[in-house]
Amino acid sequence: MGAALTLAERTRGQTAPNPNVGCVIVNDGRVVGRGWTRPGGRPHAEAAALEQAGDRARGATAYVTLEPCAHVSPRGPACSDLLIDSGVARVVVALTDPDPRTDGQGIARLRAAGIAVTCGVRADDAARGMAGFLTRRTLGRPFVTLKLALSLDGAVSRADGQSQWITGAQARAHGHLERSRHEAMLVGRGTAEIDRPTLNVRLPGLGQRSPQRVLLSADSAVLEGFAMLASIGQLADLPGDHVLVEGGAATAAAFLRADAVDRLLLYRAPILIGHGRTLPDIGLTDLAQAHGRWRLHDARMLGSDRLEVYERAR
């Protein structure tokens, strides 16, 4: 299942409205098929893995990060039917599919065909990997990641607004990798007009995965190359299931005030700025409200900078 979860990450941010799923087929202790949802949502992971496995899928075990779909689409057959036809003996599922067209029906169909099904293997990891797909269905909006680069004294820029560069080259490269995993990237008008950021992916081989640029601004004046969002309440109108918020401080605070941040990327640089800009009011009326909101998921060093990844506790 770990291998299937890793495969699913290959196209995170490219498969909407379908989830990014991974599938591994094992027969007699050997991997005979691997698949992941391709950009645009088709083919599904199971279909790709079964095509690679061919006749070797008979009697095998399929590990899949999401319940195989139970509905036939004009774009392809139901994956539960493909698995049945392939002759697999067992299917291990990480997470059930909340789509009402499947939602348990795929598992039921497999079991009715005599296939052994095990559910819930690494379900939390699968939910994290498909957070965009799941958030769109539960909250009606994309999954939002807020990226902040901070000094040791908590500043996001100098007092004059200068923020290039707080972090070093490795942290910036990681930020570009994160960009490549999102369909949209959002900044405020101040950041767009003052910094004129390119907001693209500048990593070898990933330039084609630059996300759509989105501007959050109550001002209706259009900036070339940006889609416009008048308010955070319009997030549901954005295409795709993943949005990366990159700045600036006022925009970050607005998302936090609206409780519209699902994941925090904090890049802490070993520098002191002094009298720098920090986040403005995020809507807390009591310090107690700040506790229990964020869970640390990951922490690592990127050169001399420290990355901390937090998830919203909902």
Image (spheres, rainbow, N blue to C red):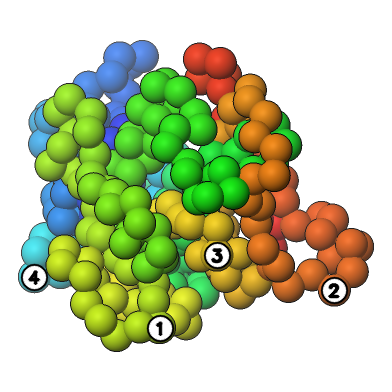
**What number of labels is visible?**
4
Give the alpha-carbon distance from disc 1 to disc 3, as whole Å.
13 Å
Report the residue marked by disc 3: 250
Work out how far the residue at label 1 is from the one at label 4, CA to CA, in angstroms: 40 Å
- Asked if 21 appears above or below 89 in the picture, the reply is below
Local secondary structure at mark 2: loop
The outermost residue toward the front is 160
Q: Give residue 274's position: percent from left, percent from top.
A: 70, 38
Whether residue 81 sits left or right of residue 65 in the image: it is left
Residue 102 appears in which quarter of the rendering? Answer: bottom left
Looking at marks 1 and 2 on the same chain, the residue that comes earlier in the sequence is marked by 1
Compared across the picture, whether 79 is left or right of 286 comes to left
Q: Quadrant location of the N terminus?
A: top left
Mark nearer the N terminus (4 vs 2): 4
Q: Nearer the viewer, residue 304 or 22?
A: 304
Q: Which of marks 3 and 2 is in front?
A: 3
- Disc ID at residue 74: 4
Q: What residue type is labelled 1?
A: Ala
Give the alpha-carbon distance from disc 4 to disc 2, as whole Å. 52 Å
**Secondary structure under badge 4?**
loop
Q: Do the residues under discs 4 and 3 have CB atoms within 8 angstroms?
A: no
Instruction: Say few, some or many: other residues with alpha carbon within 10 Å of mark 4 (under 14 / 14 to 19 / 20 or more).
Output: few
The nearer-to-camera label among 4 and 3 is 3
Q: Where is residue 241 in the image (x, y as percent from the top left)?
A: 35, 62
Q: Mark 1 or mark 2: which is in front?
A: 1
Query: Which residue was labeled with disc 2?
Result: 285
Mark 1 and mark 3 lie on one chain; the one further toward the N terminus is 1
Q: Residue 218 — which label?
A: 1
Q: Are marks 3 and 2 in contact (CB under 8 Å)?
A: no
